[in-house]
Image: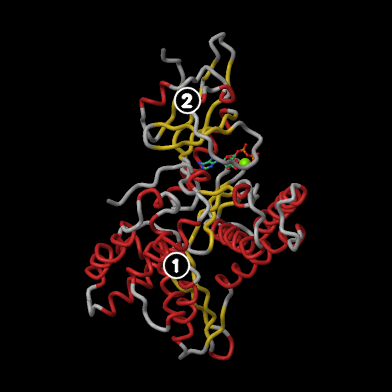
Amino acid sequence: MLVPVRITSALVDPALLDLPWSTPLEEWPAQHLVALPQGISRHIVRFVRLGDYVYAFKETRERIAEREYDLLRALERIDFPSVEAVAVVADRQTEDGEPLESVLITRHLQFSLPYRALFSHTLRPETMSRLLDALAALIVRMHLTGFFWGDCSLSNTLFRRDAGAFAAYLVDAETGALHNSLSNGQRGEDLEIARVNIFGEALDLQAAGLLHESIDPEVVCEEVVQRYERLWHEITYEQAIEREARRDIEGRIRRLNELGFDVAEVAMSGGEDGRFLVRPKVVDAGYHTRRLLRLTGLDAEENQARKLLNDLDAYRAESDLIDEQQAAHRWLTEVFEPVVRAVPAHLRRKLEPQELFAQIIEHKWLLSEQAGRDVGMRHAVQSYLTDVLVHRPDEQAILGVEVPSLS
Ligand SMILES: Nc1ncnc2c1ncn2[C@@H]1O[C@H](COP(=O)(O)OP(=O)(O)OP(=O)(O)O)[C@@H](O)[C@H]1O
Ligand SMILES: [Mg+2]
């Protein structure tokens, strides 16, 4: 029997109407739910399978759900790494006519790891350091777009593997606000909130015995702020250069691209003693991601994309193909796809294809270094499968989502 509710949605899926909306989310029958790890939250959050996808359902007040929905949609329009809002379900009531809270539906971020899942084995300091890098980069990117988070914390962030590093995503936009740009004061306030939240979370982890003994909660939260400040400075500082030193500007732009940032324009003004003052206008991160997508249609995280592009560029140089687009197509069908296909289906669920490929080229490099010669892709794939992949903890249990297969 259909229950009357009001659904605001970008995705019209009639299956939505069949869900038990007159029951509080906490009491939904298991048949609708998927058990996946989640961060700490004040609201009730459940993962629900609808068709081929898994969604996160969060029960909250209508006004809050709508605000968060609008903000997430706005972030999506500017290509910001956040979860995707799908719908708000309002006007719910129990069978006795008691009003129930609204539900915000977001798409479950595939292959994402809440930090609690990452900490489930005691985390090594290097891994911690990469998580902090990813989080700092997320906040920098956020502030560049004029977004004030207002509740930056580890549990409001999701992490995806990114070729030996991590890419961070915003999951909770409830307190956020999108401005044209942020003042230094606003940035500082946002960082202060992050510092306090992360300190608390690190203390909790320590109390639960999950924090490596060499990691100090006070240092952890301080580190996020310092990494943020360093990156922010690197991409925004004003540089004085000689009139003839065009190359200095190009060098700066290249370094920013290396860091993953795209530069839209360079603002120049005359400085003292005949020098220029130069400030690049950084538009967004995702430089390598966009280049890979444009060339191959593959959507990858920034570091994965960097590794895949290196492989593609080497392939193009070796095969003497001048046309970049043509080389990319051949690389995709002759290198990338065969490698991913060589991984048996049951092992393919451990990691997504882009991450698998990035790890295999890394493995090939290591083997070739040891052997003092190029060991070849075929050998590298075999060795990776038998020596590395089978021994990986089965992440499917953590991830719980089907990996789209290539073949
Ligand atoms: N789309 C999603 N994909 C994956 N995980 C999600 C998604 N939405 C929510 N989660 C998980 O659920 C947790 C709680 O979500 P969220 O932070 O939005 O709830 P909250 O109650 O508003 O939190 P807070 O207490 O910070 O206000 C997140 O930490 C995350 O682990
Ligand atoms: Mg939250």
Earlier in the chain: of badge 1 and badge 2, it is: 2
Residue at left 46%, top 56%? 390
Q: Given contact means CB atoms under 8 Å apart, are the residues at marks 1 and 2 in contact?
A: no
Q: Quadrant of residue 314?
A: bottom left
In the image shown, does 72 or 58 lie closer to the viewer? 58
Work out how far the residue at label 1 is from the one at label 2, CA to CA, in angstroms. Answer: 45 Å
Residue topped by disc 2: 31
Residue at left 47%, top 82%? 251
Question: In the rendering, at what x and y percent does residue 106 appear?
Answer: 48, 38
In the image shown, does 57 or 119 lie closer to the viewer? 119
Q: Residues within 10 Å of mark 1 (few under 14, many from 20)?
A: many
Position of residue 291 relative to residue 271, above or below, is above
Q: Amino acid at mark 2?
A: Gln
Residue at left 61%, top 31%? 44
Q: Quadrant of residue 227?
A: bottom right
Rendering quadrant holding ligand 1: top right
Q: Is mark 2 within 8 Å of ligand 1?
A: no
User: What label does residue 262 carry, if any?
Assistant: 1
Question: In the rendering, at what x and y percent does residue 346 appear?
Answer: 39, 48
Q: Amino acid at mark 1?
A: Asp
